[in-house]
Image (cartoon, helix red, strand yellow):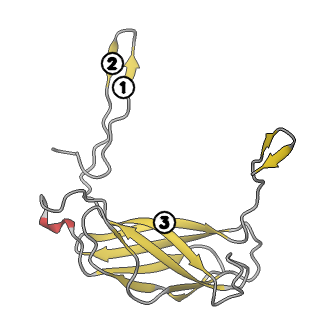
Amino acid sequence: DRGLGYGAYAPLSVMFGYTSGHLGLRESIQSPNLDINTVTVTDTIGNSSGFIDPNEPVRLAINLKNPWLNSSKVASAVPTAVTATLTSSTPGVIILNGSTTYPTIGANSNANPNGNNLVIKAPPTSPCGTNLNFTLTVTSSLGTIARDFSIRMGQPSGTLAKRRSGSQIRS
């Protein structure tokens, strides 16, 4: 079991020469810890457009996932006393409320915060399309881990693919 931790993986074999195969393993002694499952942005304390606009305060609801598959094999696989602290490396982002708590998260389950909302204020001079970079530091009985994520400011843009069927356009 040495090196078969949470981050371990075995890529497809790599061929050396004409006939010999070699399988490289990336070892890890890391135990599973909580991961970010989803990030939901709510701007009802701002202009309620559904998107992050410059200088707008928004709430972030970050859903955490416990990747342990079976807690019956390891008693410590169910994290307790879960807290999270939010920081940002993007200039101009103001963290208005940067900490929250979570309930106990069972094996192979996820949970939304049960504490205060995480609240940020977008930079006033950043244009739409700017990535806001964050780090969520999660502390629990599993240990402490930092998870990075980004959120893009503004309304997503792009074109919708449409299909032609005869002379009518269908979405």
Q: Please give left or right for residue 163 compared with residue 9 in the image.
A: right
Which residue is tagged 3? 148
Labels 2 & 1 near each other (Cβ < 8 A): yes
Residue found at x 44% / y 90%: 116
Q: Please give left or right for residue 30 compared with residue 97 in the image.
A: left
Percent position of residue 18, x then y? 39, 9
Marker disc for residue 106 = none
Percent position of residue 92, x then y? 66, 81
Dot 1 lies on which element?
loop
Distance between the alpha carbons at the discs numbered 3 and 2: 36 Å
Which residue is tagged 1? 13
Which residue is tagged 2? 21
Residue found at x 24% / y 72%: 79
At label 1, which amino acid type do we have? Ser
Dot 2 lies on which element?
strand
- Residue density around tag 1, few if under 14, some if 14–19, many if 20 or more, within 10 Å: few
At label 2, which amino acid type do we have? Gly
Q: Which of the two discs, 3 and 1, labels the residue nearer the N terminus?
A: 1
Name the quarter where the N terminus is drawn.
top left
Q: Please give left or right for residue 44 compared with residue 66 in the image.
A: right
Distance between the alpha carbons at the discs numbered 3 and 1: 31 Å
Asked whether 73 or 1 is in front, the reply is 73
Residue that extends furthest to the top in the rendered view of this protein: 18
- Residue density around tag 3, few if under 14, some if 14–19, many if 20 or more, within 10 Å: few
Labels 3 & 1 near each other (Cβ < 8 A): no
